[in-house]
Amino acid sequence: MLKTFQAQLFLNTAMLVITVLLFTIAAGNFFYSKAIHKQTIVHTTQLLNQVQTILDNYIYSLEQIITYLSENEIIISYLRLCNFYEKGRIDYETEARVQMFTYVKNNPGLIGGILIANKNDMYISNEIYRISRNSLKEDTWYKQAVAGNGKNILQPKPIGRNIRNYRNYSTGDIVSITRAVKDPKTDEILGVICIDMSLKAVEKLINGITLGKAGYIFVVDQNADIVYAPINETVYRVNTDMLKKNAGIQYINNTRYRILYTESSLTSWKIIGVFKNEELPVPLITLYKYLAIITLVSVSMALIVSFGFSYSFTNPISKLRKSMNMAEQGDLNVRFNVQEYYGEIIQLGTSFNSMMDKIRGLIDLVYIEQKQKRKAEIQSLQAQIKPHFLYNTLDTIRWMAEAHNAPDISKLVTALTKLFRISLSKGKDIITLEEELEHVRSYLYIQKERYEEKLNYTIYCNPALHTCEITKLVLQPLVENAIYHGIKQKKEGGTIDIRAEKSGQSIRISIADTGIGMTKKECDRINAALLDYEAREYTQGYGLFNVNNRIRLTYGKAYGLHYIKNKKGGITVRVHLPLKPQTENVQSPKEEESC
């Protein structure tokens, strides 16, 4: 008696496959192979050669462009720059961008973007930008280009890049061509040029060709990784490692497929055609009759043979499948009883139980890591807020010291001291609303000394909210925006009104100014951007997006900022925060202050 699942499965499968294949091959091979073999290879190979020629032309065109750029004196001069402030940088960048724009414009469906980066971490591009501050020299594509020592490097579907295209191409939509640029005088590598080829052109070319009713063409590189493939359930099941000759037969999902390919001498890529034998454009009606009879008999024999042994191994597999379904529905405590079975079933059940234990451990680990990541991101965002007005304040103290001899300077320095003391808050991220208002009050006092009668302000806070907790440095960036983008732009100056009130289980703080204001369309655009977490990467209005993201990271997406036009012609920004009382006794500030 066979004791292992492997032995039973091997014997039963061998019986089925041998029975079906011997009968099918003996009866049908003689009629089938001679009728279709030659015509199939000739017809399909011609199509594949056409695709290969066009694709080689695409690659050759881009290699010509990257060769020209790497030998262009303007590009080389730019790559020689050591830092952003070197003489001639602007001229080199301008000329280089013009050339890149020309190539992209002349090849709109082929070039997804061009990037030129030097060894000193400077880069230019019309289409591509760096995602994070990490050096581009640490990217895999950059290192591979340097290792290529001046040769063109093809990188289909490049992943893990620190760059992104403004048109939001995914890595699966492009083929990256890179080359290290050498200094013609010293033979030193100055940097790397990267051109992203859009696969839209390849998709349009290949999708216009069909092989039979359901055949298709796809492209793999020299490592057998897919460069481009149409949407098809069988394309990833094709075993490209078995393509030793120009033609072959593979069984995919119990269907017989003929596979042909051509290999490019330029890129070493393979253009592969896949189609069903029965869909070949060959009038073989008589042959199909024979095949229909053979298939009917073969299937009948297979059903009779398989019926006898299927139950012997489907029962334990069915139970294991049910356990997996329960796990898929969220029951992570389910386990498979391995004591009821033998052989490989025990191994499968043990592996399943071990997997469930590991999943449970990983879930706990991910929860801890996400919690730490959230805290770190909040701290990182807070660290990015900087006192932009520091130099103006010091300048104000300087001219006051020259014009006066006493108290005003002392008050101004005291206000500045409070401002920085509250900003630091002994490293705390959460402070009381009283401390936050004191921080804003010190800031406005400094600005009042600077702008004199051009700036007035009032501060009101519901006394019941004085000890409530709030994320620090929330209000000052918003007040700064109101001054510099509203009141400062108005000749006669204006007033800032700050009010903190309770609204249900929330705190609503409004900062209203009488500045030059904005249109309703501009307010709507800002509010829409504030709802998008990615707005943190905007370069304009950085302070308000930073504040909004810190609030949402700390308290959730239900809280944040909202901009509206007010009746006085200026702008009112509303800050929505949760009501979080503090148990400690804190001395309350003045209920209302104006200046």
Image (cartoon, rainbow, N blue to C red):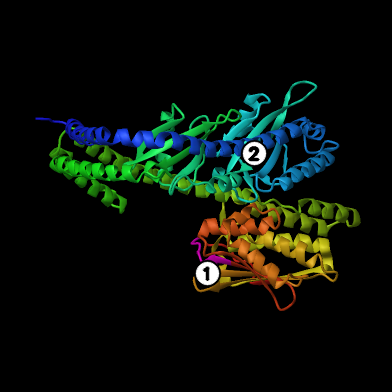
Residue drawn where x is 41% and y is 32% of the image:
248
> Mark 1 — residue?
506
| Place of residue 182 in the rendered image (x, y in percent of width and height, measured from the top left) | 73, 25
> Mark 2 — residue?
58
- Does 445 sit above or below residue 113? below
Residue 337 in view = no
| Place of residue 130 in the rendered image (x, y in percent of width and height, measured from the top left) | 65, 43
Cα distance between the residues tagged 1 and 2: 60 Å
As for residue 479 lying within the magenta part, the answer is: no
Mark 2: which amino acid?
Tyr
Mark 1: which amino acid?
Ser
Residue drawn where x is 79% and y is 56% of the image:
410
CB under 8 Å between discs 1 and 2: no
| Farthest residue, direction right | 403
| Place of residue 441 in the rendered image (x, y in percent of width and height, measured from the top left) | 70, 63
Q: Dot 1: within a 10 Å radius of its alpha carbon, few (fewer than 14), some, or many (20 or more) residues?
A: some
- Residue 329, by quadrant, is bottom left
- Residue 24, by quadrant, is top left
Residues shaded magenta: 576-584
341 vs 446, left or right, is left
